[in-house]
Image: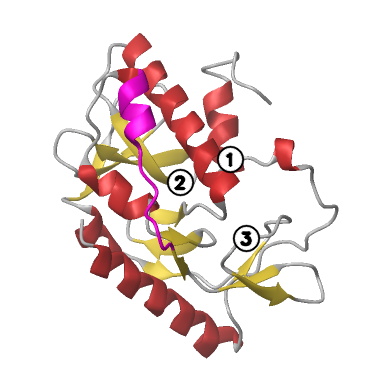
C-alpha cells in the first residue's frame, strides 16, 4: 500500500468529524498517546493522527515465526499513532485498527504472533488482521495483500478489496461517539483491539488476559 493513501484517509476522517460534530475524533482509550489533543467532559481522548519520526517495524515478528510479512502491514501500522478508524462500507460497519502508543504497538505485535501461530496450527495460509467487521476480522492475504473478511478459526470468506489502498477508497468514516471513559486502567492490562483479543482467546486460551 502507499503511505499517502493512509494519510489521505486520516485527513478525510478528521474532516468528517469536524463537519459532522464540530470536533476532533474521539477515542475511549484511557491511557495517554502521542495523538491525543485533550479530553472531553466525558473523559474521551480527542485525537489527531501523529506521524511517527521512526516507523515501527515487524522484523521481530518475522524472525520469531520465520515468515516474511507482506510489506503493506508495516505501511499500515508503522507510520502513525492514532485512534481506531470507524467506518461504514457495503460489506458492513467496522473499524480499522491503529496503534495508540508504543505499548499498544508492541501488544499488536504479540497479538499478530498469536494469530499467525493459530493459522499455522490450523494448517491455513497466513493472514494479517487490520480491522474488525461486526463479529469478524478484516485481514490481509499475506501472499498478495488483498483484503478479506475472516471469521476467527476459518479461512477468509469474502474478498472486499485488492489492496488496502483500494479498501480505503470504499470506506465512509463513521462519527459515532464512543462510551464515556470510566476508570483508568493499568498499563499491563491495556489491550490492542479488545474485541479482536476476545475473539482470539476462545481459539487460543493460553493467551494472557
Front residue of this view, candidates 34 and 193: 34
Q: Which label sits on residue 132?
A: 2
Q: Which mark is residue 195?
A: 1
Stretch of the chain drawn in magenta? 52-64
Which circle, 3 or 1, is nearer the viewer? 3
Q: Residue at x 63, y 40 (%)?
A: 191
Magenta-drawn stretch contains 100: no
Above or below: residue 5 compared with residue 93: below
Circles 2 and 1, Cβ within 8 Å, touching? The answer is: yes
- What residue do we see at 27% from left, 17% from top? 124
Give the Cα distance between marks 2 and 3. 22 Å
Q: In the rendered structure, which disc, 3 or 1, sits on the residue that comes first in sequence?
A: 3
Whole-percent x, y for residue 46 in the image: 64, 73
Specify whether residue 152 is in view.
no
Query: Residue placed at 25% from the left, 67% from the top?
Result: 5
Asked whether, in this view, residue 109 is left or right of residue 166, the answer is right
Residue 91, above or below 6:
above
The residue where tag 3 is placed is 33
Amino acid at each position: 500500500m502507499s503511505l499517502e493513501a493512509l494519510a489521505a484517509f486520516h485527513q478525510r476522517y478528521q474532516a468528517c468529524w469536524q463537519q459532522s460534530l464540530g470536533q476532533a475524533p474521539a477515542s475511549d482509550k484511557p491511557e495517554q498517546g502521542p495523538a491525543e489533543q485533550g479530553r472531553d467532559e466525558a473523559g474521551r481522548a480527542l485525537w489527531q493522527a501523529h506521524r511517527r519520526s521512526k516507523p515501527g517495524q515487524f522484523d521481530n515478528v518475522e524472525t520469531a515465526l520465520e515468515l516474511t510479512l507482506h510489506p503493506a502491514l508495516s505501511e499500515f501500522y508503522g507510520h502513525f499513532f492514532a485512534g481506531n478508524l470507524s467506518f461504514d462500507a457495503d460489506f458492513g460497519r467496522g473499524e480499522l485498527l491503529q496503534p495508540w502508543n508504543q505499548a499498544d504497538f508492541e501488544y499488536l505485535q504479540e497479538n499478530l504472533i498469536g494469530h499467525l501461530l493459530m493459522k499455522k496450527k490450523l494448517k491455513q495460509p497466513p493472514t494479517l488482521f487490520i480491522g474488525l467487521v461486526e463479529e469478524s476480522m478484516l485481514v490481509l492475504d499475506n501472499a498478495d495483500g488483498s483484503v478479506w473478511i475472516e471469521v476467527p478459526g476459518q479461512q477468509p470468506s469474502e474478498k472486499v478489496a485488492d489492496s488496502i489502498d483500494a479498501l480505503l477508497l470504499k470506506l465512509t468514516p463513521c462519527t459515532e461517539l464512543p462510551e464515556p471513559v470510566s476508570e483508568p486502567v493499568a498499563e499491563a492490562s491495556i489491550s490492542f483491539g479488545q474485541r479482536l483479543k476476545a475473539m482470539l482467546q476462545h481459539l487460543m486460551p493460553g493467551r494472557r488476559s
